[in-house]
Image (cartoon, helix red, strand yellow):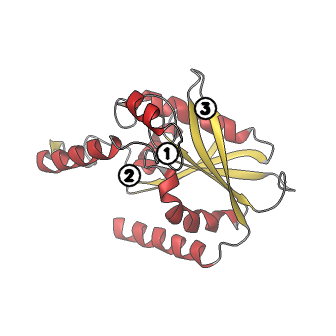
Amino acid sequence: MPRLFLLLWTCLIAAGASAADGIRIQEAWITMPDGVRLSADLYMPDGTGVPKEKLPALLEYLPYRKHEARSRNYGLYSYFVQRGYVVAAVDIRGTGNSEGRLIPHEYSDIEHDDGEVVIDWLSKQPWSNGNVGMFGISWGGFNALQVASHRPPALGAVITLCSTDDRYADDVHYIGGCVQAIDVLGWATTFTGLQARPPSPPVRGDWRECWLARL
């Protein structure tokens, strides 16, 4: 089944990459209740001003530096934009170009609460028809399921791949309830190193100050 999911995901990327004209990326900041701003890329139909018809939004919510993933995202997101959606890629707080202290662990309450604010913000934009969906693979699939469990009013659908609602028995850390010590050690070491990277200097002029504050 995971192979089928990955095949479908690959087909979507290929379909979007083959015809991506008429799409623009609009950068936005989404302010959280504590004043921290999350960085968002909005993939929209090209044109001036607000689209003539209001559109639903799709959210992918990740810690993986969306600016550096635009070559991947553009092909995939184009598939949805060409079919009448606005796609939002949002960096989780403390990651990528988003402000704030790094979340304490995967899928924390902070991540969920911020996700609800993002969904509400998307539903209230001038171009939005009020409907929001979430999608993702791995981390994005997990948090889509978990945010959905909070029942945000505007969230109407989720599409998740390579994810589960049972993290204890069916995740990378525990398989059948037993900790996967070797896998977890490699996983933790790799991601600790990745999250210690500074923001991309061409994107964030204040990258040094932001990076030092994060560390």
Q: Which mark is residue 117?
A: 3
Farthest left residue in view: 182
Q: Which residue is mark 1?
A: 144
Q: Are marks 1 and 2 in contact (CB under 8 Å)?
A: yes
| Residue 194: percent from left, percent from top | 32, 47
Q: Earlier in the sequence, mark 2 or mark 3?
A: 3
Name the element at disc 3.
helix
Position of 188 relative to 163 (above/below): above
Labels 2, 3: front one: 3
User: In the image, is 194 to the left or to the right of 74?
Assistant: left
Q: Considering the image in quadrants, where does the N terminus appear?
A: bottom left
Position of 76 relative to 63 (above/below): below
Q: Which residue occupies 40% across, 36% down?
A: 107
Quarter of the image for residue 52 reads bottom right
Quarter of the image for residue 30 reads top right
Q: CA distance from mark 1 to mark 3?
A: 14 Å
User: In the image, is 93 to the left or to the right of 42?
Assistant: left
Q: Which mark is residue 163?
A: 2
Q: Are marks 1 and 3 in contact (CB under 8 Å)?
A: no
Q: Which residue occupies 36% across, 37% down?
A: 106
**Residue 173 visible here:** no
Mark 1: amino acid: Ala
Name the element at disc 2.
loop
Q: Are marks 2 and 3 in contact (CB under 8 Å)?
A: no
